[in-house]
Image (spheres, rainbow, N blue to C red):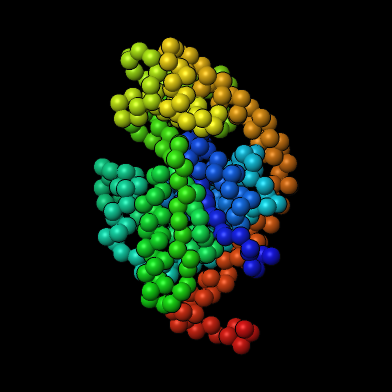
Amino acid sequence: MMNAPSKPTLFSGIQPSGLLTIGGYIGALRNWVRLQHEYDCLFCIVDLHAITVRQDPPRFTERCLSFAAQYIALGIDPEAATIFLQSHVPAHAELTWLLNCHAYMGELARMTQFKDKTRGAKEQAIGVGLFDYPVLMAADILLYQTKLVPVGADQKQHLELTRDLAVRMNHAYGPLFTVPEAFIPEVGARVMSLQEPTRKMSKSDENANNSIALIETPDVIRRKIRRAVTDATLGITYAPDTRPGVANLLTILGALTDRAPAALAASYADQGNAALKNDVADALIAFLEPFQARYHALMDDREALHAILRRGAERARHRAAPTLRRVYDAMGFWRGEQREET
Ligand code: ATP
Ligand code: LTN
């Protein structure tokens, strides 16, 4: 079954930097859980991406394990899906090099995430890894003949670059890669910062009041939501352009209770921000408390967690090998001794 999956392949990943937030859950992880049985899924902790900014080594190690435990505690079934660390599959780095030699400076320099993350920095101080980040992401996806990539709206441009690279390589060398599609949710594709609701909620934001971490305590959740920036207009309406703070709270509540934000707004017709905030905090706590109990239990059983990641890495290495070999062959790399084996 592993060699010839009957379901189309789904791949997604999150870099282990900062704390996983409710934004990442609503924009991406929630859909991983929803789609995991319809697709043949690989869920990666993209640790090689995380070192595009400096990491503290011991905390980085711990965070990689913590992210794996959070994937599982959110409902990813390690029996059905392959959960693994990117660095355990060297083919990701190898394919990145092969793709690098077909990617252009111009297309990478246009990436808005690169521009955002380097705004104001001197060129001498901008890491090459940050620039090359989208090529590593393309390698992640293309290695597995991925059909679907569930991500938040901020990753759309990286997906387009991945598709361009796949088409370019297929054109140059014959069919090598499946051309993947992004899966971006209709509601919650861009959960906004609580204090600056015109910016995306981000897990490595320096201001902790901007986001709700999945491992946040109930008291902190209440405090952060109570302090979330809204506006002075009376009543509740869903108007992302003019009332981004209120719209964001409606989006979060809508995602957690499976209701459309505009319909939710109507149900608050006679009420104000305080009532809405109270319900958002209640919904977050109701969702996160049982999640956190599962998470802590998983973190307390390290052997089991390690075994899941070892097995995931083995499966992923096995799955990645044929595509990498095919690319080397198509480009004319001499295989040496191995040629006679196949
Ligand atoms: P960082 O701040 O470390 O760059 P991030 O918070 O932007 O990270 P990522 O690791 O880049 O998070 O994203 C993980 C996944 O979650 C991606 O698919 C991304 O699109 C999605 N995601 C992240 N933040 C949000 C958000 N605020 N709203 C919706 N989706 C999000
Ligand atoms: N760049 C993504 C993380 C990421 C990813 C991937 C997502 C790395 N490789 C492959 C989907 C598929 C981000 O969220 N910042």
Determine the image quadrant of residue 239: top left
Percent coordinates x, y for residue 268 in the rendering? 45, 17
Of the pair 20 and 270, the residue shown nearer to us: 270
Towards the viewer: 340 or 166:
166
Relative vertical location of residue 175 with respect to residue 220 in this rendering, above or below: below
Relative height, residue 237 to residue 203 (above, below): above
Image x and y of residue 261, in percent: 45, 28
Q: Nearer the viewer, residue 130 or 21?
A: 21
Q: Is residue 285 left or right of residue 54?
A: right
Residue 239 appears left or right of 65: left
Corner quadrant of residue 70: top right
Residue 315 position in % (x across, y down): 65, 61
Quarter occupied by the C terminus: bottom right
* Residue farthest toward the bottom in the current orientation of the protein: 340
Where's the N terminus, which quadrant?
bottom right
- Residue visible at 40% across and 30% down? 193
Residue 119 pos. (x, y %): 28, 43
Q: Is residue 180 visible?
A: yes
